[in-house]
Structures are given as C-alpha cells and as structure tokens.
Image (cartoon, grey):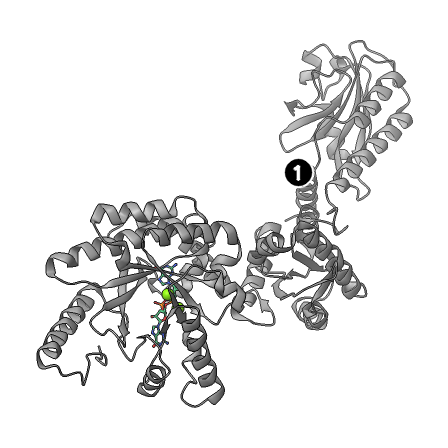
C-alpha cells in the first residue's frame, strides 16, 4: 500500500468514528464563519470516500446531508490540505462544472479541517451567490481548527470507559493497526459475570472493575504499551514496541498480581485471569480480526488451563470449529441422521429387576464426524437455542420409551438438563405434554441437573424443579461433589437421587481419604433422603466397596458403556430373561450386573 493510500485509509477509519449527531458547538462555528464573511451560507463538511458529509451548516436543512463529491472544491481542499478561494466559480476552469455552480453559488472560500496528526478530514467553507473578493482566510483557518478540536473532543468523550477511566474498544480499534502484539486479559470467566452480579449486585462489579483497572494500570505503567478496557471484565494491552516475546514476558510478570482475590466493599472476589496474545503480522485483515484473535486465544487459555495462549492459525481453526458447532447444531436438529441418543445402563443393587439408564446425546457432524458431548454441549448450553436441543432429547427418549412398551420392555430413563432449560418458563409444561402425547408415566422419567445449574437463578430454577417433581418426575443431582454445595444448600434442593461424580471413583481403591469421603457422602445423602448413584465405576474393586458402603445404584463401564438403542434394547431383554430365570430358580447368586459389552 502506498503512503498516500495508507493515509487515506487512516483518514477514512478516523471518519468512521466521528460522532455525527447535531452539535451546537459546531453550529456556532459555522455561524461565526458566515458572519465573518457576511455570507449567507457556511458549511462544515467531511470528505468521505465518494461524498461530502455536511455535519453542520447555517442552513439547518442541509445539516446531516450527504452529497456526491462531483468535482466539489472541498474535495480539492481535502486532497491538497490547502485553503482555497474562488471569487467566481463560473470563471474557474477547474470548477466550472461543479454542482455548487449549477445551484447558483459564485463565491467559495474554504479552509481545511486538519487533525493534530495532519489528517485532513474535510473543510469549513463559506459560500455566496454573488461574486466577491477573498475575505479573511486566516480567521477562517482558525475557525476550522476550532471545529477539529470540537470533533476530537466529542470523539474522545465516547472513547473512555466511565468506570475504569481507560480508553475503550472503539479507541483500541483505531489504535491497533500499527502495534506489534495485542494481549487480551479476561479477569474472570465472562460466563460467571452474570452470576457475580446476581449474587452480589452490580455495584460490586463496578467496584471490581475500578480496582482491577487501577491495578492493571500500575502493572503496565513502566512498559511500552497501552491499556484498554474492552468488555465488562476484559482488558486489552497493545504492545507498541516489543512483539510476541515482550507480550509473553509482560503476561508472566503481571499474572501473579492478577491472580490474587480482589477486595470489593469488604468482599473478596476471586479472579481467574486468562491471557491471549495475538502477534502482529498474521494475516489479520482488520483490527477487529486482530482483537478477536487475542480474545479467542484468551478463551482457549481458559478452556485448557494454560498460563497464556499465543494465537496460531491452528488455534483459529479450532475456534472457527467451535463457532461452526453453534451454527450447525440448528441444522442437526432438523435432520434425521446427525443426532442420536445412547443409553448407559444403571444397576440398582437392591432392586435388580428395575432397569434404568441415562440417555446421552451423540452428534455425528457431516464434516467433523463424531463430536463428544463435552466438546459441544458446554458451548451450545450458553445459547438460547439449547432448550431446543433438550426438547429434542426429551422427545426422542420419551418416544423410544413408548416404542419399548409393546415389546414388554420398560426402563426408567434419565435425561440431562441444563440451567438454561430450567430457567425457561414453559419447560415443565413441555415435558408434561411429551409424556402425555406418548402416554409415558412421569415416574419412568428422571431429570439430572448439576448444582451449578441452580446457582444462577435459584428461585426460578427451584420453582421449575418443583413443578417438574409435582408431575411425578424424579430428580437427580448430577456430578455431585464438583460444585459449591454446602449441606444447607443441598437441603433446599428438591431431588430424589444424588449421583456422586466419577472423579471420586478413580482412587477409591487405593486412597483411604477418598474412600472415607465417598462413604460419608453416601451416609449424608441417605440422611437427607436421597438414593445414591455412583457414576463412572470402572473396576470390580470399586463396585464391591460401593456395594458394601450401601450405595444404591451403580453406573459405569463395569456395568456397561453407553449403548446404541438396539444394543440397549437387547441388554434389557437379556436382563429380563435373567431375572425370570432367577425368579424361577430363586437363585440370587450372580445377578446380571456384570455384563460387558
Ligand atoms: P454426565 O451426565 O455426568 O454423564 C456421564 C458421562 O460419563 C458420560 O459421558 C458417560 O459416557 C461417562 N461415563 C460413564 N461411565 C463411565 C466410566 O466408567 N468411566 C468414564 N471415564 N466415563 C464414564 P458423555 O456421554 O461423554 O457425556 C458427557 C457429559 O455431557 C455428560 O456428563 C453430560 O453432562 C453431558 N451430556 C450428555 N448428553 C447430554 C444431554 O442430552 N443433555 C445435556 N444437557 N447434557 C448432556
Ligand atoms: Mg448425567
Ligand atoms: Mg454425571
């Protein structure tokens, strides 16, 4: 790009950010210009790519209009950066064709509106219908510089965040083009911001932002960089000299201080900063691309618990892929061949004749193949389309249950639901309609929710859970032991079943502490009236320990991996057959629990 082109680009970018709403300050300047020349019309115009933007005029009907450039004298002023006086447009060889002349204008005087960086934005012009000699061009130039000061002041006002006092995203996008590297800093998981506000109130968030921006300012002060506040809890640092290495050094240097909890109005708010770095020189087409690369890298750092992530093309491919999930899931919901349910059997140690299973979602993407639920559900769960996914799961599972009925097969199926489902007002109604349509008993359905699903909007979610339970549907707390639960909290949850998270099962056999913990969890759950399911049980040793500790049900690879619908149907048939035999021979040894598939 030639220097002239890049100047023009910078000029147009700057014009893109100008506040063009009516402004008394600018109108006063145009009025003064008209008075100075005793002329009937003065106009302040900004030169866009193909048109003139009349941001202020003594004729209010012109203010805000955009008119085509068509050989206008203001275009010449923008190009040369020099004032221009034309006593009579009709006589002028260059402008004899211009639109102003056709409108009857004869006299034209204009001064360039030039920023402190030397970019010419447009001109301040005075026009008259009569030919006349040149007036005081110096005074007109002074007024033009007053106009530019006013424009810059207005831009500045919209470019600083009022809470942090730092330049904002708009300012960053303007400054980003020539930097060596961009760092994005997300102080806490943005998904938790809503939670923080709902638990503590927005005043704490404001205080958090004020305190952390002061801290960041102190931490970056001695480095050749600029700090911006670009989102509720997200900041960006533009490295003006050193590149990626300097950015990484800076991250390593500032990270420890940002990992300390922040004291806001007497409450300690824990932080979990994530850092992403986007180097200059990547084929970022725009400032938006460079910033997005840094923010995506920070999110990747959060997901992978990395101290920081430096943007690479591969990382970008991964983040584009995540974006595709969000778009493509909508199509998947309306196709027959992409989504399916698998069923993972659960064994009831005390009532082995009761068959039950957890329905788990599977997605075969037309391009990416099988995608694990852990990869797409946490993403889609954050969006408003997730309830549709859950409705698909509920409808499919309930239809399947109806299909088993004529085959004399019956299982209680448990379905996973997320916070966003329980927050949507017609969730319970929807479920009861599906059950009615297929004539499936609510007591054959169980819903699994995690403790974190309840935290965000406690009252509404609990209300919804109570509605579901009053239908006769069972409720299970999933992944127990991984959330924030306290005893008193647990007591307030309407649930029938507690599923102990599989992370506790791994060391059950060799770690005495974990074993004691699981035993006491089982005891506590029983005291609160819950049935207990152990998830992710993989070994015979763990299975025996859990049975001995009084655990009610077991789910895990030791029993069976999740099965396709056909294989699960066969599994139920086999189990039923075995029970019939057991009932016949009254032989309770060797219950059909340890099948491997
Ligand atoms: P979850 O609800 O805790 O489901 C249990 C997960 O543990 C399943 O993973 C299952 O395959 C796995 N698992 C079961 N037994 C064992 C074992 O012995 N060892 C090991 N290592 N893993 C075992 P999956 O199917 O990958 O699902 C992961 C998570 O995705 C689920 O965890 C659940 O949170 C979510 N999910 C799956 N389907 C749905 C759905 O339809 N709706 C919602 N909201 N979430 C779903
Ligand atoms: Mg589950
Ligand atoms: Mg679970």
Q: Nearer the viewer, residue 274 or 31?
A: 274
User: Is residue 293 shown to the viewer in this render?
Assistant: yes
In this view of the protein, which residue sits in the foreground, 350 or 18? 350
For residue 470, above or below residue 222:
above
Above or below, 591 against 493 in this view is: below
Placement of the C terminus among the 4 image quadrants? bottom left
Q: Residue 549: x and y, percent?
A: 37, 83
From the Cβ of disc 1, is ligand 1 less than 8 Å away? no
Q: Quadrant of residue 48?
A: top right
Total labels drawn: 1
Compared with residue 541, is residue 232 higher up or lower down, i.e. above or below?
above
Q: Is residue 561 left or right of residue 127?
A: left
Residue at disc 1, secondary structure: helix
Q: How many C-alpha atoms fall within 10 Å of the one at disc 1: few (<14), some, or many (≥20)?
A: few
- Residue 355 falls in image quadrant: bottom left
x then y, percent, for residue 585 = 9, 81
State the residue at coordinates (75%, 24%).
56
**Quadrant in which ligand 2 is drawn:** bottom left
**Along the horizontal axis of the image, is 264 left or right of 538?**
right
**Is residue 283 visible to the viewer in this orientation of the structure?**
no
Q: Which residue is mark 1?
A: 16
Pick the residue in front: 2 or 61.
Answer: 61
Q: Residue at x 76, y 14 (%)?
A: 91
User: Would residue 26 be found to the left or right of residue 491 on screen?
Assistant: right
Residue 270 image point, x, y percent: 65, 66
546 versus 236 height, above or below? below
Whole-percent x and y of residue 361?
A: 32, 61
The residue under the point 82% across, 42% down is 116
Indicate left or right for 334 with 579 as reference.
right
Task: Name the one closer to the observer, 22 or 351.
Answer: 351
């Amino acid at each position: 790009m030639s220097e002239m082109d890049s100047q023009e680009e910078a000029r147009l970018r700057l014009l893109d950010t100008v506040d063009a709403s009516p402004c008394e300050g600018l109108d006063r300047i145009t009025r003064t210009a008209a008075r100075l020349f005793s002329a009937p019309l003065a106009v302040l115009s900004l030169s866009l790519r193909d048109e003139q933007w009349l941001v202020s005029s003594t004729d209010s009907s012109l203010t805000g209009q955009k008119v085509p450039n068509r050989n206008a004298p203001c275009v010449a002023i923008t190009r040369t950066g020099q004032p221009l006086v034309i006593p009579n447009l009709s006589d002028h060889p260059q402008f004899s064709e211009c639109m102003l002349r056709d409108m009857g204008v004869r006299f034209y005087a204009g001064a360039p509106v030039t920023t402190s960086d030397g970019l010419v934005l447009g001109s301040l012009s005075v026009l008259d219908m009569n030919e006349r000699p040149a007036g005081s061009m110096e005074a007109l130039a002074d007024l033009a510089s007053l106009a530019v000061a006013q424009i810059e002041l207005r831009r500045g006002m919209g470019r600083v965040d009022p809470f942090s006092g730092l330049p904002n995203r708009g300012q960053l996008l303007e400054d980003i083009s020539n930097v060596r590297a961009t760092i994005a800093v997300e102080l806490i998981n943005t998904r938790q911001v809503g939670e923080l506000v709902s638990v503590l109130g927005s005043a704490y968030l404001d205080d958090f932002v004020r305190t952390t921006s002061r801290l960041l300012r102190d931490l970056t002060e001695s480095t050749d960089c600029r700090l911006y506040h670009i989102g509720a809890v997200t900041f960006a640092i533009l490295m003006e000299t050193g590149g990626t290495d300097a950015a990484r050094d800076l991250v390593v240097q500032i990270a420890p201080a940002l990992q300390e909890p922040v004291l806001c109005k007497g409450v300690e708010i824990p932080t979990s900063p994530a850092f992403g770095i986007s180097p200059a020189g990547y084929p970022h087409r725009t400032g938006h691309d460079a910033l997005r690369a840094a923010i995506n890298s920070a999110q990747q750092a959060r997901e992978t618990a990395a101290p920081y992530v430096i943007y690479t093309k591969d990382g970008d491919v991964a983040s584009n892929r995540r974006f595709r999930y969000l778009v493509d899931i909508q199509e998947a919901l309306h196709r027959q061949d992409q989504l399916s349910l698998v069923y993972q059997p659960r064994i009831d140690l005390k009532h082995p004749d009761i068959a039950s299973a957890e329905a788990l979602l599977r997605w075969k993407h037309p391009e990416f193949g099988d995608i694990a639920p852990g990869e797409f559900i946490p993403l889609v769960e954050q969006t408003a389309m997730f309830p549709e996914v859950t409705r698909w799961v509920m409808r499919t599972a309930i239809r399947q249950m109806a299909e088993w009925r004529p085959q004399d097969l019956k299982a209680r199926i448990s379905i996973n639901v997320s916070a966003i489902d329980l927050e949507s007002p017609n969730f319970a109604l929807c479920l009861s309609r599906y059950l009615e349509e297929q004539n499936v008993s609510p007591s054959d359905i169980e819903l699994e929710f995690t403790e974190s699903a309840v935290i965000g909007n406690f009252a509404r979610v609990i209300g919804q859970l109570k509605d579901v339970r009053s239908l006769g549907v069972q409720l299970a707390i999933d992944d127990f032991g991984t959330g924030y639960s306290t005893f008193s909290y647990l007591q307030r949850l309407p649930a029938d079943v507690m599923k102990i998270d599989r992370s506790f099962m791994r060391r059950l056999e060799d770690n005495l502490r974990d074993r004691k913990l699981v035993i006491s969890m089982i005891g506590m759950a029983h005291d609160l009236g819950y049935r207990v399911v152990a998830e992710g049980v993989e070994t015979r040793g763990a299975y025996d320990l859990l049975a001995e500790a009084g655990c009610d049900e077991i789910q895990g690879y030791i029993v069976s991996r999740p099965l396709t619908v056909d294989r699960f149907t066969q599994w139920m048939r086999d189990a039923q057959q075995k029970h019939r035999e057991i009932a016949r021979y009254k032989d309770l040894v060797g219950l059909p629990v340890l099948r491997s598939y």
